[in-house]
Amino acid sequence: MSVVSYEQLRAELAPCALHEPAGGYAPVPVTERLAQAIWFDQRLKRDGLQTADGRRVQVVSPGWWNLEAGPDFRRAVIAFDNAKPQLGDVEVHLHSADWHQHGHTRDRLYDNVILHVALWRRGEQPATTATGRALPQLLMADQLDAPLDQLYDSIDPESYPYDLDSHVGACEPALKPASPETIAALLEDAGLSRLRTKARRLTRWIQRAGIEQALYAAVMEALGFKHNKEPMRRLAERLPVARLRELPAVQAQALLLGVAGFLPERTVAGRDEATRRYVKRLWDVWWKVRDELADRLLSRDEWRLAGLRPANFPWRRLAAVAQLLAAHWELWPKIADALDSQPEPKRAARLASLFTDLEDAYWSGRFSFGSKPRPEPELLIGAARARDIVVNVLLPVAVAQGKLLEQPSLIEAAEKVFAAHPPLESNALIRFTAHRLFGQRVPPRLLRTAARQQGLLQIFHDFCLSDRSACERCRFPELARQFVAKQVAS
Ligand code: SF4
C-alpha cells in the first residue's frame, strides 16, 4: 500500500504553480485561490488593462465571490473597448488552458461567463462556452500592479472572501453607528416586507387557480429546492391537484412518477421482491392512464440530480407529495387550524409536522428504486426542508388568505409565527449580504430568527441584485441612514 501524505493529497486536489521571483528568493507556490484574490482585489494596472487579443477592459465590478457550483465570480460588470458595461460571470484560473482542462467548454453553468481570467498563458486554444461563444481572455501576469511575489506576501488567500473587511458594501459605514437592536429592527422590517411580497405573489396564484392548487404548486416548487424548482412547478401544472387528490397514495405516486419520467421499466428482474411488487402496483395504474397523459410527460433531462443528497432525490419528494395529498388534502384547513387552535409557541412546529410526519411503506426505507433498504427509516421530508416550507410557503399563503378572506387575525397570527421562527439553514446569499452590510462585525446573535435572515435576503434582492455600479448608485445606504436616525430619535 502506498503511503500518501496530506501534502501530496493537497497538491493533487488544489494544484499550485511555482513562481520564481526575480530577486532569487525561494520559489513562490501560487494557488488558484491567490489568483482569485488578485482578481477580487483588482491588483491590476487598471488603467491600461487589456485582453489577450488587445481589447481594452474596464472592470466596474469584479463580481461576487461564488462559493457554490459554477463560475468563480457572479455578476461582474465589465466594459470592453469603451462599449456599454456588460453584466456576467468571470472564471479565474492559473493557466489559460485550464478552461478546457476543467471541462467548462461543455458545462452549461458557465454559459453566462463574459471574461476568462488566467494568471499565465498556456496553450493557444481559445476559451468557448457550451453555446460556442468565444470568450475574451485576460492574462494577469503582465498586468499586475506589483510583482507577483510581493502580492503573494501581502495577500492571505485563506481570509477570502468573508474573513476580512475589504469588499464591504457602501452601506457598511451607514450601518456602523447602529446599535444591535436597531440593526435587528431593520432586518425584521425587511423580513416582513419579504413575507408580504411573497404573499402578494401567492394572492395572484390563489385568485387564478384556487387555494389548494396554489398551495400544492408552491409546495412542489419548494420541494424542488434550487436545482429542481422549475420541473417541479411544471409537474404541478401538468398534474393539477384536482387530478390527484381523490387518489390513494400509490395511485398518485404512479401518476407523479410517470409524468415526471421516473417510472422504471415494468420488468425489474434482479431487483428485490419489495421493489418488484411496488413497481408492478405503479404500472397497474400507469398503463391505464399513460396514453391520456402522453402529452404532459417531462423528460429526464429536465431534472438535475448531480450534487443532490440521495435522501433528497426528486422521486422521494414526489412520493411524499402523494402521501401529503392522501393524508392532508385539503391542506389549507390544516394550516388555518394550526394557526388558530394551537398555543402560539407550538404553531411553527405543528405546521412543520405536516411534512415531517409523512411516511411511505417503500420510500421511507429507500433512496432509489431497487436500492438497498436503509437500516433505519429516513424522513421523506427532513426537518430543515419542512421549516423552510413553513417560512417560505405556508406563512405567506396564510397572509394571502387573510387578505383575501378579510381575516386580519389570520395575518396577525402568521406574522407572529414568522417573527419568532428559529433560523433556517444559512446559505451563500445570506453570508454574502451579511458580509457586505456588516463586514466582520456581524453581531453574533443577530441572525437568530428566520425573519432577520429573510430581511437580509430581501435587501440582497432589492438592492445588491439590481446594482451594476459597485454600490455607487445604490439607495440602500441612504435608507439605512434614515432608518438609524429615526430609531435613535424615537
Ligand atoms: S449594492 Fe447597496 S445594499 Fe448591496 S452592498 Fe452595495 S450599498 Fe449595500
Image (spheres, rainbow, N blue to C red):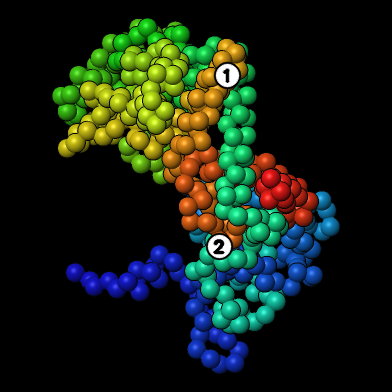
Instruction: Give, as a three-letter code, the residue at label 2.
Output: Gln
Instruction: Give, as a three-letter code, the residue at label 1.
Output: Pro
Query: Which tag is nearer the camera, tag 2 or tag 1?
Result: 1
The x and y percentages for residue 459 are 64, 44
Mark sitting on residue 408: 1
The x and y percentages for residue 119 are 61, 70
Give the alpha-carbon distance from disc 2 to disc 1, as whole Å: 40 Å
The x and y percentages for residue 433 are 59, 51
Residue 154 quadrant: bottom right
Residue 277 quadrant: top left
Find numbered disc 1 in the image and state the secondary structure of the residue it sits on.
helix
Query: Which residue is more in the foreground, 107 or 230?
Result: 230
- From this view, report whether residue 252 is shown above or below residue 83: above
- What residue sits right under mark 2 in the picture? 440
Residue that lies at the very extreme toward the bottom in this rendered image: 24
- From this view, report whether residue 117 is shown above or below residue 246: below
**Residue 78 can be seen in this image:** no
Going 34% across and 35% down the picture, which residue do you hit?
A: 382
